[in-house]
Image: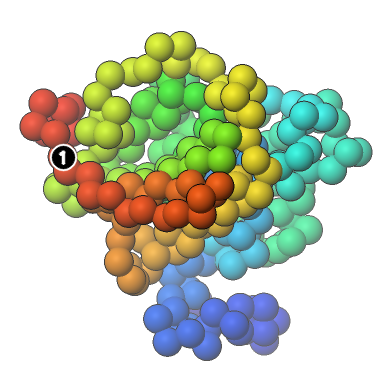
């Protein structure tokens, strides 16, 4: 693959970085990332990944844009109300970077459709809003050896975790949360509230971790959980070990 002059200009601030360079940028353009959830986290994740040149991006979301989403789901505007989130988000990404392969999945991810949707992607970014979907994605990525970069937000608190299932020693979501919480379908943002910019902080960290995992640069977050308290403004990186009784030990 040869870069056009326009592409070199577009990505020049990344290409100039020693840890990325032309080779790194080519690797980003050759990578395929699936984003689950076009919400508070999915918005900044999608915008950054498209802008920085992830070659193929898919977005899964079956919901429609509601007025209560607009305080944090910055990929949408008031004119998008009642329209399907994944297709609106993909249209926005096309405007940001028209040279990418972009795919919208207007579906609710479930055990029957996850393989069909995710099989052509190497890395999954989880920006979903409930535990049922989180565990579904975790188990799928574990079984199919895909990298998973996950984020969660509630009130003023956020978490980011990366599971690199290409590595045998990677823990999984079950190591962190051994039992599915009660009411796994519930979106905690709806009941407990969430601070808008926190979605931007966590989603942006997820986008940054995606690039690090693809390019294998810096310190991988795999094996740790980043816990952020946005009120106290405290960031803590906590070790997460594999649990001996977790499903991730059986493979
Ligand atoms: Zn595990």
- Between 90 and 192, the one nearer to me in the picture: 192
Q: Residue 199: name its quadrant.
A: top right
In the shown orientation, is residue 31 left or right of residue 73? left
Residue ranking furthest to the left: 244
Q: Is residue 10 shown left or right of residue 14? A: right
Residue drawn at x 33%, y 37% as measured from the top left? 141
In the shown orientation, is residue 179 left or right of residue 41?
left
State the image coordinates of residue 188 (x, y, percent, origin top left): 55, 24
Which x, y percent locates residue 40? 64, 40
Residue 119 visible in the picture: yes
Image-quadrant location for residue 192: top right
**Residue 149 horizontal/vertical position (percent):** 41, 47
**Residue 206 in view in this figure:** no
Snapshot colouring: rainbow
Residue in view at x 49 percent, y 43 percent: 158
Compare residues 161 and 142 and report the one nearer the observer: 161
197 lies left or right of 145: right
Question: Where residue 44 sits in the image (x, y, percent)?
Answer: 63, 52
Count the marks: how many? 1
Compared with residue 118, is residue 28 higher up or lower down, i.e. above or below? Answer: below
- Mark 1 burial class by Cα count in 10 Å: few <14, some 14-19, many 20+: some
Name the residue furthest top.
183
Q: Is mark 1 within 8 Å of ligand 1?
A: yes
Residue displayed at 54% across by 29% down: 129
Residue linked to disc 1: 242
Q: Residue furthest front?
A: 232
Q: Is residue 130 above or below residue 200?
A: above
């Amino acid at each position: 693959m040869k870069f056009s002059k326009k592409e070199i200009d577009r990505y020049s601030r990344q290409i100039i970085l020693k840890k990325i360079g032309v080779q790194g940028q080519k690797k980003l353009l050759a990578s395929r990332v699936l984003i689950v959830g076009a919400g508070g986290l999915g918005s900044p994740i999608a915008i950054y990944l498209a802008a920085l040149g992830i070659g193929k991006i898919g977005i899964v979301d079956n919901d429609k844009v509601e007025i209560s989403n607009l305080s944090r789901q910055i990929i949408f505007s008031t004119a998008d109300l009642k329209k399907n989130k994944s297709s609106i988000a993909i249209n926005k990404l096309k405007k940001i970077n028209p040279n990418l392969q972009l795919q919208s999945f207007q579906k609710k991810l479930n055990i029957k459709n996850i393989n069909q949707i995710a099989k052509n992607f190497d890395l999954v970014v989880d920006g979903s809003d409930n535990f049922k979907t989180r565990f579904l994605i975790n188990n799928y990525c574990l079984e199919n050896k895909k990298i998973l970069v996950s984020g969660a937000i509630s009130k003023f608190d956020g978490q980011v975790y990366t599971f690199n299932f290409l590595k045998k020693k990677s823990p999984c979501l079950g190591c962190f949360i051994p039992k599915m919480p009660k009411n796994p379908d519930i979106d905690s943002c709806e009941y407990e509230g969430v601070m808008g910019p926190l979605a931007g902080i966590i989603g942006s960290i997820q986008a940054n971790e995606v690039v690090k995992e693809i390019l294998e640069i810096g310190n991988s977050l795999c094996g740790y959980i980043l816990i952020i308290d946005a009120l106290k403004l405290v960031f803590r990186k906590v070790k997460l070990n594999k649990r001996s009784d977790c499903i991730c030990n059986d493979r």
